């Protein structure tokens, strides 16, 4: 069970207000972990009072935890259904002030990022271009970008293409993606943000507003990146295309592949899907193993 948290408000570079929750461990403090969530979700996917969760695991292991709502999500509104508009690049740029805030609370201890899906790749993109401000380690869970160049499976690519076309059609009609009404997520997404997702699929490039790819700059990331993937995450963050996407990290990428034959002493039947990586109590052994990995870093 999590004990009382402190609520913070942080101003992004353009004045947008970001909401955060912070927990301080009762045990000896080992470091600060900045948690970020997936698209169509908010920090509630990371924090629960009614079951085990990643925030509880880290706090109980002695880590200060800061859980952020991405702009347009949770306590970082206005939300899409309230008229909020933001871009993918806004989310990347928000990494800077979020990391600076985490450092300001760290009391000199190491600072780490933990990104599930969306925050995983937005934080990687930012650190790749701002390597001097890198955290001490990054954890990327179910992180992938849908570009044909990294997807060797024609069947998976067809599923991704059809998903993209369906989402684009719905967004064009509604003016946003209504994830809540469709029961595929707890947060609607803005049209401007999703345009970047559509561009990645259609143009086969993960790029900024000027068309410059974020991908080559990932080689600049100086810290270790634990890349957590599950075969049960069959399309969004499948181990094969996700591994191709982050192979550019070289020795900095440490893969943690779940399922049968895993090398992390985890149950072989632990094979969660994309959201279950964070929302299923059965994933708790994996969360605990991540904490152990952080404790073992020099």
Image (cartoon, rainbow, N blue to C red):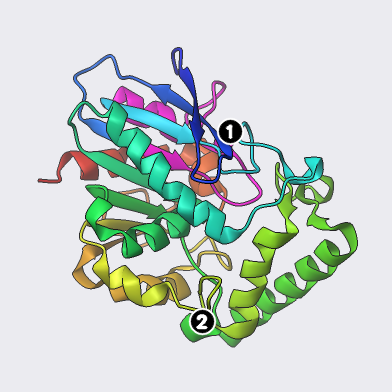
Image vertical order of residue 176 relative to residue 209, above or below: above
Residue 258 in view, yes or no: no
Query: Magenta segment: does it hold 48?
Result: yes
Q: CA distance from mark 2 to mark 1?
A: 31 Å
- The quadrant where residue 33 appears: top left
Residue 44 numbered tag: 1
Crowd tier of the residue under label 2, counting other residues whose Cα lies within 10 Å: few below 14, some 14–19, many 20 or above: many
Local SS, label 2 = loop
Image vertical order of residue 124 relative to residue 12, above or below: below
Residue 251 in view, yes or no: yes
Query: Magenta segment: does it hold 55?
Result: yes
Residue span colored magenta: 34-61
Position of residue 276 measured from the top left corner of the image (x, y, whole percent)? 55, 47
247 on left or right of 274: left
Residue appearing at x 44%, y 52% in the figure: 269
Question: Pointer 2: what residue?
Answer: 151
Q: Quadrant of the N terminus?
A: top left
Local SS, label 1 = helix
Crowd tier of the residue under label 1, counting other residues whose Cα lies within 10 Å: few below 14, some 14–19, many 20 or above: some
> Closer to the camera, 148 or 7?
7
- The quadrant where residue 107 appears: top left
Residue appearing at x 46%, y 17% in the figure: 5
């Amino acid at each position: 069970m999590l004990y009382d948290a402190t609520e913070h408000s942080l101003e992004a570079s353009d004045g947008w207000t970001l909401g955060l929750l912070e927990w301080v461990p009762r045990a000896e403090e080992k470091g600060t972990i900045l948690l970020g969530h997936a698209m169509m979700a908010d920090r509630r996917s990371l924090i629960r009072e009614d079951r085990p969760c990643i925030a509880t695991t880290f706090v109980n292991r002695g880590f200060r935890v800061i859980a952020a709502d991405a702009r347009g999500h949770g306590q970082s509104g206005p939300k899409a259904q309230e008229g909020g508009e933001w871009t993918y690049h806004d989310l990347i740029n928000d990494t800077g002030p979020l990391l600076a805030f985490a450092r300001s609370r760290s009391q000199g201890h190491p600072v780490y990022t933990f990104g599930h899906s969306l925050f995983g790749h937005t934080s990687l993109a930012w650190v790749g271009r701002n390597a001097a401000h890198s955290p001490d380690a990054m954890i990327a869970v179910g992180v992938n970008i849908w570009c044909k160049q990294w997807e060797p499976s024609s069947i998976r690519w067809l599923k991704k293409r059809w998903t993209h076309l369906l989402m684009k059609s719905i967004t064009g009609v509604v003016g946003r993606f209504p994830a809540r009404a469709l029961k595929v997520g707890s947060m609607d997404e803005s049209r401007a943000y999703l345009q970047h997702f559509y561009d990645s699929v259609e143009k086969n490039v993960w790029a900024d507003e000027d068309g410059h790819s974020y991908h080559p700059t990932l080689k600049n990331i100086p810290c270790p990146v634990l890349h957590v993937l599950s075969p049960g995450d069959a399309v969004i963050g499948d181990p094969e295309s996700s591994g191709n996407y982050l192979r550019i990290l070289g020795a900095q990428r440490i893969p943690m592949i779940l399922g049968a034959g895993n090398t992390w002493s985890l149950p072989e039947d632990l094979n969660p899907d994309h959201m279950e990586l964070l929302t299923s109590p059965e994933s708790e052994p994996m969360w605990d193993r991540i904490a152990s990995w952080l404790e073992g870093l020099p």
